[in-house]
Amino acid sequence: MTPRQSVVTLAIALAAVLTACDAEEAPEGEAAPAEAATEIEVVDNSFSPETVEVAAGDTIRWTHEGQAAHTVTFEDGPDSGTIDSGDTFSHTFDEPGEYAYVCSIHPGMEGTVVVEG
């Protein structure tokens, strides 16, 4: 084998090792890590972002970053109840559609989840 072939072989082997190290495999007997949730911040009487688009089966997590209590309330769906500073609320959207929600404590505080099929 020529020196050039040795270098190419070594580079291919190194790439294979690095790729294997980057793979996020769960230890045997454990579930693979779940995909990260789409994040919405609840702060200063607003949802940020106000509108999010996700795929069916995705999870959204609202995180309360402000001081005053809030809710995440859907007309025909989940209701977080009161969430205080530092609390979170998560919901998985399985069906395509457009889902409007409000904070039932603060009129005008609104958001929308658009779920694509």
Image (spheres, rainbow, N blue to C red):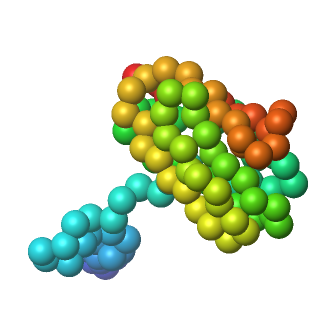
Residue drawn where x is 54% and y is 44% of the image = 79
Tell me: 20 left or right of 114.
left
Tell me: 45 left or right of 81.
right
- Asked whether residue 99 is in view, the answer is yes
Classify the position of the N terminus by image quarter.
bottom left
- Asked whether residue 58 is in view, the answer is no
Q: Farthest left residue?
A: 29
Counting from the top left corner in percent of width and height, residue 10 is at: 30, 77
Residue drawn where x is 37% and y is 38% of the image = 57
Foreground residue among 11 and 70: 70
Tell me: 77 left or right of 4.
right
Counting from the top left corner in percent of width and height, residue 80 is at: 56, 50
Classify the position of the C terminus by image quarter.
top left
Count all numbered tags in the image, as a single digit.
0
- Location of residue 75 with respect to 49 vertically, above or below: above
Counting from the top left corner in percent of width and height, residue 2 is at: 25, 75
- Location of residue 46 with respect to 15 vertically, above or below: above
Q: Quadrant of residue 9?
A: bottom left
Foreground residue among 8 and 17: 17
- Location of residue 116 with respect to 7 vertically, above or below: above
Foreground residue among 93 and 26: 93
Residue drawn where x is 70% and y is 36% of the image = 102
Tell me: 85 left or right of 107.
left
Counting from the top left corner in percent of width and height, residue 36 is at: 47, 57
Residue drawn where x is 67% and y is 49% of the image = 71
